[in-house]
Image (cartoon, rainbow, N blue to C red):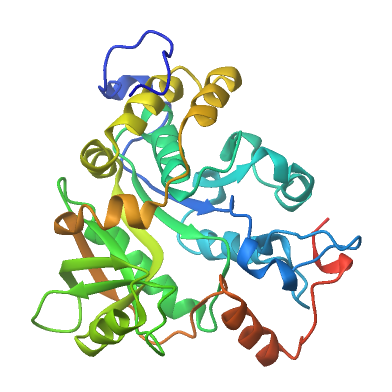
Amino acid sequence: MSFLHPPASRGLGFPSRGTFPQEPGKLWAVVLAGGEGTRVSALTRGPAGNPVPKQYCAFGSDEPLLRWALRRAEAVVPRSRILVVVVEHHRQFWRETLADLPRENIVVQPLNRGTAPGVLLAALDVVLRRDRDARLLVLPADHHVESEDVLRRAMLAAARAVCRPGARLVLLGMAGEDADREYGWILPSGGPSVGIRAVLSFVEKPATERSRALTGSGALANSLIFAFRGRTLVRLYRVALPELLRAFFPVVRAGCQEAFLREVYEKIPSCDFSRAVLERCSSSLAVLAVPPCGWSDLGTPSRLARFLGRQGQGHMASAAEVNVS
């Protein structure tokens, strides 16, 4: 099935080096901030009782989670090479939260279709329009980290590991506190427990018994923080989601015109990156185990409630906590 009859294209080729304004091969960061936060919406309400996506909530802090993620990204790349993926119907939130980010670095999706389209759109935006040899680091906007410097060193190590052409996509794996079935689990190859290891298998949100078996075998929780070369990601999508790649490629290369991009998004199904790409391409993945850093994905009510308890914020996000002006 074809999602779109897009502008005429020259196929799935990369532009020549001379078409880019800066030296190629830099490291870029992509912050994923398009989620709805449906599972935790009871804990993230606005002044009128309306649900607010958790990445725009501060939970008693001076800044919302998205600003924490931006600082995390700025610890490894300059702001000019940070892209934030958002959705149009969240504009009331991100317009002020991202007011100090260059507008061309805000990648606006017409609709929320899950993480697989969001990752691909941002990666193609970089490699087709900015830096054909780019390395990219993806990080979600809804994480809490107590020891940011530990995570920063791990992110830089993953970014260095993908410098070589043909390098595998490198996931950052976390030691799970328990067999949480809401995580994806990465089973590394044998050998030393430090450094970059090949991935034997990747299982997204398995049943509880399978989660326990995986953690007992040394599996690591998927943080959804990962580094890759742009060309590597294109190869993975060519295997896992070829129709999505064919739909996006000419539209992004033509400049992401709003009408064409909306037409694509109206026709594609929702698609999760971990399940659709990582599970299908585990032989092309590597993993780096991150030392304990107090990391938590705040994507479930139980994890968010634990976080709020530790912060002494046993309440819903108030109106003043929603945005940073």
Would residue 58 be seen by someone viewing this image from the given angle?
no
- Name the residue nearer the viewer: 103 or 49: 49
Q: Quadrant of the C terminus?
A: bottom right
Q: Is residue 160 left or right of residue 60?
A: left
Q: In which quarter of the image is the N terminus?
A: top left
Would residue 173 be seen by someone viewing this image from the given angle?
yes
Taking the spot 80% from the left edge, 82% from the top edge, the residue there is: 315
- Name the residue nearer the viewer: 206 or 262: 206
In terms of image quadrants, where is residue 24? top left
Above or below — where is 230 with respect to 308? above
Above or below — where is 215 with respect to 135? below
Task: Locate residue 143, reporting x and y percent.
Answer: 55, 70
Task: Locate residue 76, reporting x and y percent.
Answer: 45, 61
- Name the residue nearer the viewer: 261 or 72: 261
Taking the spot 57% from the left edge, 43% from the top edge, the residue there is: 112
Task: Locate residue 178, reporting x and y percent.
Answer: 40, 89
Task: Locate residue 196, reporting x and y percent.
Answer: 19, 70
Most distant residue in the left direction: 191
Taking the spot 39% from the left edge, 55% from the top edge, the residue there is: 137
Most distant residue in the right direction: 48
Above or below — where is 137 with respect to 237? below
Q: Is residue 223 left or right of residue 105?
A: left
Taking the spot 36% from the left edge, 20% from the top edge, the residue there is: 19
In terms of image quadrants, where is residue 92? top right
